[in-house]
Amino acid sequence: MNDYFEQRRLRDEKRARLRQLWREPEKHYVRVYGWLPTAKARVTKLKKPARYFTLCGEEAIDVLHFAAEGIIERNARGFPGVGVCELYSQILAEAMRLLKFVGKQKVGRFEDIVKEQDFGDWFEYDIVNLDLMGVPFPEGEAPFEGTWGAIDKVLECQSNHKTPFDLFLTFRGDPAGTSQQAIEELVENLDSNLEHAKRKEAFAQKLGHSNVRILLARDYPQFLLIGLPKLVLTRALEHGFDVPSILEFFYRRVGDRGEYKIVKFIFSFEFPRGRPRRLSNVPHSVELYEQGVLRVFQSQPVNVDHQLGMQPLVSGQLQNAVNALLLLGQ
């Protein structure tokens, strides 16, 4: 009996910590200034509400936010164009208490859900939000299985359905618990890209040097902000997508083991017009790859902490906006 109460206490403490993270102004800054403009642009192209898939957590703040902004459909039943996935059934139940109804709900790790036989039949969305919160390459996981296998499966399904979409990715920018094999492969991948003169010049202009291992040693989050988009770009082109827009955000967070960074990405995937597909056999895709890599090396990630520090009133406004959304959900 004591074990039961102890487990329940620990679970409740964890949920309380997660609620605070979901509500933080830094996170809502990215919802408002990153996710929302991208989603509005997608809805403008669609000329109808977007189909939205998310790992929303029990308060479903992102769903409520998009509904309030007219991004997704909300009717008397709930949210027919929304799909949600949650690891814990109790947290999903809390989310569904707010949402009432969604078009698809799944319990389990998203990395496992993608392996289900019928996944490719139902997974087709205009906006996909994988707020994964963990490290991008967990220890004990093959470098490009698990998390990255799931991302690749999303690209495959969207390509098979011929559906352009936006992908929001969130990771913990902390080397602790990370597969060193995967990091080594990413280092080698970036090194090979710097053998090209234009890419090396763009990389050096951005960082002041062109040494990937120095970058890894000095600034691990920045290493991810450069290396992960390059990885996504490669897989996207393999599935026939162009990636005309990549946005990046990062901010500081303090956890049980000290300070680390959250890194967030927004990718827009479109099909090149009038061109055959696949990187492996299409010269035009090689051109798109070159443009994409240069875009990654030249991009300037948004330092959310700096932005909020420069605009102190915005932090309070964002907190008030989150509170208002939570009231709407009651």
Image: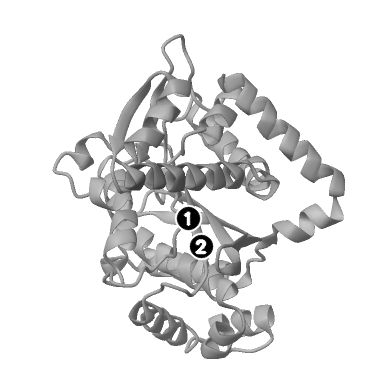
Disc 2, SS: strand
Which residue is depicted at the point 51% across and 31% down?
63
Front in this rendered view, residue 285 or 81: 81
Q: Nearer the viewer, residue 150 or 193?
A: 150
The image quarter in which residue 201 lies: bottom right
In the rendered structure, the answer to whether residue 286 lies left or right of residue 210 reads left
Tell me the residue at 55%/37% (across/down): 39
Residue 4 position by quadrant: top left
Residue at 44% x, 50% y is 269
Q: State the residue at coordinates (61%, 27%).
A: 326
Is residue 325 among the parts visible in the rendering? yes
Q: Which residue is mark 1?
A: 133
Left or right of 224 in this view: 122: left
The mark nearer the N terminus, 1 or 2, is 1
Q: Which residue is mark 2?
A: 172
Q: Position of residue 16 (x, y in %)?
A: 54, 42
- Report the front residue among 211 and 145: 145
Q: Name which residue type carries label 1.
A: Met
- Report x, y in % for residue 27: 63, 48
How far from the left and from the top, in percent, is residue 216? 54, 83
Are the two marked residues, 1 and 2, in contact with CB atoms closer than 8 angstroms? yes
Q: Is residue 276 visible?
A: no
Identity of the residue furthest to the front in this view: 2
